[in-house]
Image: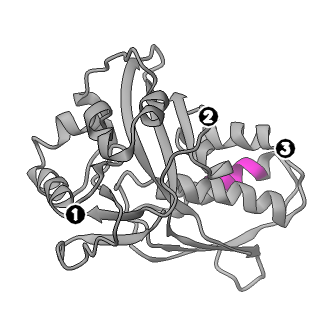
Amino acid sequence: MILFPKAKINLGLFITERRADGYHNIESVLYPIGLSDILEIQEKRATDPFFESTGIKTDVSYRQNLCYKAYELIRKQYDIPPVAFHLHKIIPLGSGLGGGSSDGAFTLKALNTLFDLSIPRRKLMEMAMQLGSDCPFFIDNRPAYVREKGNKIEHTTLPLKGKYLAVVVPPIHVSTAEAYRLITPSPRSTPLNQLLADHPPEEWHQVISNDFESVLLPRLPKLQTIKDQLYQNRALYAALSGSGSSMFGIFDQKPGMINIFPDCFVWEGII
C-alpha cells in the first residue's frame, strides 16, 4: 500500500491559555495542502528491512518515528503481522507543516485498511491524539477549526478553492518547545473561525495572526524578510505556519516564488 501523507498550513494560530497539564489551549484552522511525503507499507517478508527512510534525512531512530509509534499502538490492541515501512521524506522537518504528524495518522489509517481491522473513526482519533496534538486532524484530512490541545475538531469551509499557494521554508530550525516557552497566552473574544468566515482572505492580516510570529520574527529576521517578499509579490495573506520555520502566501495568480528564494525549500500549488 502506497500513501501520500499531506502537509498542512495554519490559517491563524491563537495561543489562548496555558493548561495545568503543561500543554496550551489553542485556536487554529488547519488546511491540508498538496505537498506530501510518500509512505509504503506492506506485510514484512523475511528479507525486508523493517524501516527504511529516504529523502530528507532524519537524525532519529525509527523507534522515534511516528509511523513506528502508530504501528505499535495498533499492534498492542490488534493481532497484526510485522510490516515493512519505506518512508520518503519530502515535507521539511521542523517547518510547522505537520509532516511527522501526517505520517503517523496516515499509518493508522493504512493499517486499519490493510488488515481489515474496522477500527471506528472515533477510536482512530483517540489513537492519533496519543501520537501528537496535530495527528487527529490528519485522520479526516479536511479543513478544520481546531481548539484546546488540537483534539476539538470541527470541519469548516473557506473561500480558497482555486487560489494559489506558495510555501517557503528557509534553512532555519525552530524548536516548538522553545517557541511555546517564549509565548504569552492571550484569550480572544471572537472565535478564529468566525473571523476567517466574516472577512475575505485579503483582509485576514487585519483580524487574525499566528501568535508565534510575535516572538519568532524578531529573533529570526529571515522569516520577516520572506513574509515581506510574499506581500510584495501580491500575496492576499501571508503568515507563519504552526510553530515552525515555514512561511506561506495565498495568491490569486500563480506566484512564481522559486527564483525569488533560491536558498529555501519552495513548494507551489493550487489550493
- The amino acid beneath tag 3 is Pro
Q: Nearer the viewer, residue 257 or 141?
A: 257
**Label whose residue precedes the other's in the sequence (2 or 3):** 3
Q: Quadrant of residue 112?
A: bottom right
Residue 167 falls inside the magenta stretch: no
Please tell me the numbered disc located at residue 145.
none
- Residue designated by label 3: 120
x and y percentages locating residue 18 in the rendered image? 39, 18
What element does badge 3 sit on?
Answer: loop
What element does badge 1 sit on?
Answer: loop
Q: Does 180 sit left or right of 32 as displayed?
A: left
Q: Which residues are magenta?
A: 69-74
**Label whose residue precedes the other's in the sequence (1 or 3):** 3
**Label whose residue precedes the other's in the sequence (1 or 2):** 2
Q: Disc 1 and disc 2: Cα gap in Å? A: 30 Å
Eye-nearest disc, 1 or 2 = 2
x and y percentages locating residue 169 in the rendered image? 28, 63
x and y percentages locating residue 194 in the rendered image? 48, 28
- Residue designated by label 1: 170
- Residue designated by label 2: 153
Which residue does the image show at 67% across and 49% down from the upper left? Answer: 139
Q: Mark 1 packing: few (<14 Cα in 10 Å), some, or many (20+)?
A: some
User: Is the image coloured rainbow, by chain, by secondary structure, or in one colour?
Assistant: one colour
Q: Disc 1 and disc 3: Cα gap in Å? A: 39 Å
Q: Looking at the image, do the residues carrying marks 2 and 3 touch, with CB atoms under 8 Å apart? A: no
What element does badge 2 sit on?
Answer: strand
- The amino acid beneath tag 2 is Ile
Q: Mark 2 packing: few (<14 Cα in 10 Å), some, or many (20+)?
A: some
Which residue does the image show at 57% across and 41% down from the upper left? Answer: 144
**198 above or below 112?**
above
